[in-house]
Structures are given as C-alpha cells and as structure tokens.
Amino acid sequence: KMKANQIYVNFPVKDVQKTKQFWTKLGFPVNEQFSDDKAACVMINEDSMYIMFLAEEYFRSFIDRPVAPANTVQVLVSIGLNSTEEVDHVVNTALENGAYQHEEPEDFGWMYQNSFWDPDGHGWNITFADLSQMPSQQ
C-alpha cells in the first residue's frame, strides 16, 4: 500500500511577493529555502504539506497545456484546521487582505467550513471537523 509523506501543490500567480505576503498574513510560514523571485513555498503543515506559488511564466515551464483562464476553476483546495476560531481567523484575515468570500460559512454540527477566493482567483475551503461527532451512516 502506497503512502505519501509530503505533498507539494503548485499554483500559478501573478505576483509572487504579494502572494507570499498574503499567506504570511494568514499565519502560514514561507520556506525561504524553496522560495525566490519566481516561487514562494508556503508551509501549510511544516512537516508535510506545501503550496508552491509560481510566477505564471515559471509555472508554464512545467506544463505543456495552457493555464486555466481567469474566471475558471480547475481545483478547489480544502485545508483542515484545529478549531472554528482558526477557520474564521484565516478566512477573515484573507478577506481583509484582498480575497473575497466564496460561500457563507456553514456549520453542520460536527464540521464547520468557511471559504474564500484568493487574489489570484484560487478557491480555498477552510474547515474544522470533529470526526467523533460525525453522524453515522445507516
């Protein structure tokens, strides 16, 4: 059985420095060892989950297909945090720094989610789930 120990998700962005500042304000550190003027490595989890925000031209050097045009979506990324307060803090900070609301927050009792579109139009669902409270499927 295969089990990955790290994930690096790559996104094209218009301005690497602005993107780096945006995510730093949300509370996520940047790994400077993997960052330069063409890329910012944001550590979603310092041990295993990384988002590589690449300048569009640099991003294109890794693919042989076009980058998705503006106002389209190919992925919606969900990030699980440790509390509803952390979820709202991250989303509210994002909204204060150039993001805009995706959907209104939803509370399912056992799971809470809030979401935003970042300044480059990438979609993020920020969630907290208490799996011990998840309803059993009958």
Image (cartoon, rainbow, N blue to C red):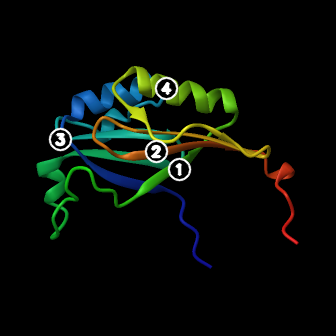
Q: CA distance from mark 1 to mark 2?
A: 6 Å
At 26% across and 50% down in the image, what residue appears? 71
With 17 as the anchor, is 95 left or right in this view?
right
**Mark 3 or mark 1: whose residue is earlier in sequence:** 3
Few, some or many residues within 10 Å of mark 4 (<14, 14–19, 20+):
few
Residue where numbered disc 4 is placed: 27
Residue type at the position of mark 3: Lys
Residue where numbered disc 3 is placed: 38
Residue type at the position of mark 1: Ser
Residue where numbered disc 1 is placed: 78
Q: Quadrant of the N terminus?
A: bottom right
Q: Nearer the viewer, residue 131 or 70?
A: 70
> Could you say whether the residue bearing mark 3 is in a helix, strand or loop?
loop
Which is closer to the viewer, label 3 or label 2? 2
Residue type at the position of mark 2: Trp
Q: CA distance from mark 3 to mark 2?
A: 22 Å
Few, some or many residues within 10 Å of mark 1 (<14, 14–19, 20+):
some
With 134 as the anchor, is 59 left or right in this view?
left
Residue where numbered disc 2 is placed: 124
User: Is label 3 in contact with label 1 (beta carbons under 8 Å)?
Assistant: no
Residue type at the position of mark 4: Gly
> Could you say whether the residue bearing mark 1 is in a helix, strand or loop?
strand
User: Is label 2 in contact with label 4 (beta carbons under 8 Å)?
Assistant: no
Q: CA distance from mark 3 to mark 1?
A: 25 Å
Relative height, residue 37 to residue 133 (above, below)? above
